[in-house]
Each structure stands twice: as C-alpha cells, then as structure tokens.
Image (cartoon, rainbow, N blue to C red):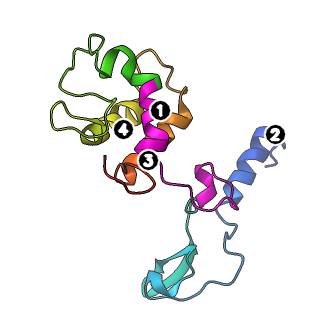
Amino acid sequence: MRLPLTPGLLVCAVAASGCFISENPVPPQVCAQDADCPSTHRCVTVSEGERLCEVLYPPAPLDFDAGSPPDAGPARTPTWCNDIQPVMAANCVSACHGATTTGSGHPEFRLDVYSSASPKGALEMAELIKLRAVDQLNMPPGAPPTSLARERDLIKRWVAAGSPFCDDAGTP
C-alpha cells in the first residue's frame, strides 16, 4: 500500500525519526558513574550490564540564559544601600510599608528601614518580600506581573545572597 505524501505525514515521519537520530556527535563512552562522563553527559544504563555516557536533555542552562551575556562576568550582588532601598522607596513605602502604614494595615513591619527589632525591617522580612514580589507576583498591588522585572530580579538575587546591607559590608 502506498501512502500519499502529505505535509502532516512528513512532519510525523521527521518527528519519529528524531527518536533514532543520535544526539551524541561522538561514539558512546562506557562508564560506571557520572564522574566518568563529560560534564554535558550522564552515565545511564542502556541495557543489562551496559552503561554509557549520554547527552543531558534538556542541557543544563548556561550562565547567560538568565539574561546576562556570556562575556559580562558574574553579576554584582545587589545590596540594600545601592539597589533594594530605592526599589522599596519607589514601590512599597509611600502609603503602605513606611512610617505611614494606612494603606497596608501592617504596622508590624516597615520597608523603609533595613533592620529593626520592632517593627521588623526589610532584612527580617526579606523572604516574605521575595515570596510576594517575585514568586507570587502580587506586590506591589495592581502592578502587572510582567512589570518591574528588573526590580524583581534584584530582590531575588538580594535574598539569595543573604540580603546584604552595603557593598562595604558596613552595619546598618
């Protein structure tokens, strides 16, 4: 039986052949553990008693996949003094999380100060700031989730770095 060659059939044939096309540009390497393989491969069991280095899929993200070009070097760690305090002042402090908390109803913390025992400051609230502004994208209220991408990235990196105060490691 002869099947007519249609675009749909052609796409299916090409997609199915992908299962049989090797992704390894070099002959397979026998291995016993991941350490025996190049960094882009993993040691996998392909049959009983046979383990080979296979390409990772999907490949591990490169440093520049997160937005920095490959020649930019490591990104500078954001600090409260240089990066986060201006973000808080512009987006969080005015009527909600500053000296006036009438907009939030949460006088137990303020985001116009770095650290404080009572009310809590940004350092003590860092994880919650990240949760609400970066993970849940619901702060500041009314901001579209895609807005403030740069500021959200700064907050994410600041919290991941331990919420540092200033570049000079000074104390608040």
Between the C-alphas of marks 1 and 2, the distance is 55 Å
Crowd band around label 2 with a 10 angstrom C-alpha radius: few (<14), some (14–19), many (20+) = few
Upstream in the sequence, badge 3 or badge 1? Answer: 3
For the record, the magenta segment spans 63-89
Mark 4, mark 3: which one is toward the viewer? 3
Q: Secondary structure at mark 3?
A: loop
Between the C-alphas of marks 4 and 2, the distance is 48 Å
Upstream in the sequence, badge 3 or badge 2? Answer: 2
Mark on residue 7? Answer: 2
Between the C-alphas of marks 1 and 4, the distance is 16 Å
Asked if the residues shown at circle 1 and circle 4 are in contact, with their CB atoms under 8 angstroms apart, the answer is no
- The residue at which mark 4 appears reads as 130
From this view, report whether residue 42 is shown above or below residue 90: below
Q: Position of residue 54 (x, y in %)?
A: 56, 75
Mark on residue 86? Answer: 1
Q: Amino acid at mark 2?
A: Pro
Residue at 15% x, 32% y: name it.
Answer: 118
Whether residue 139 is visible, yes or no, is no
Q: Quadrant of residue 167?
A: bottom left
Q: Decide if residue 102 is on the left or right side of residue 142.
A: left
Mark 1, mark 2: which one is toward the viewer? 1
Asked if the residues shown at circle 3 and circle 1 are in contact, with their CB atoms under 8 angstroms apart, the answer is no
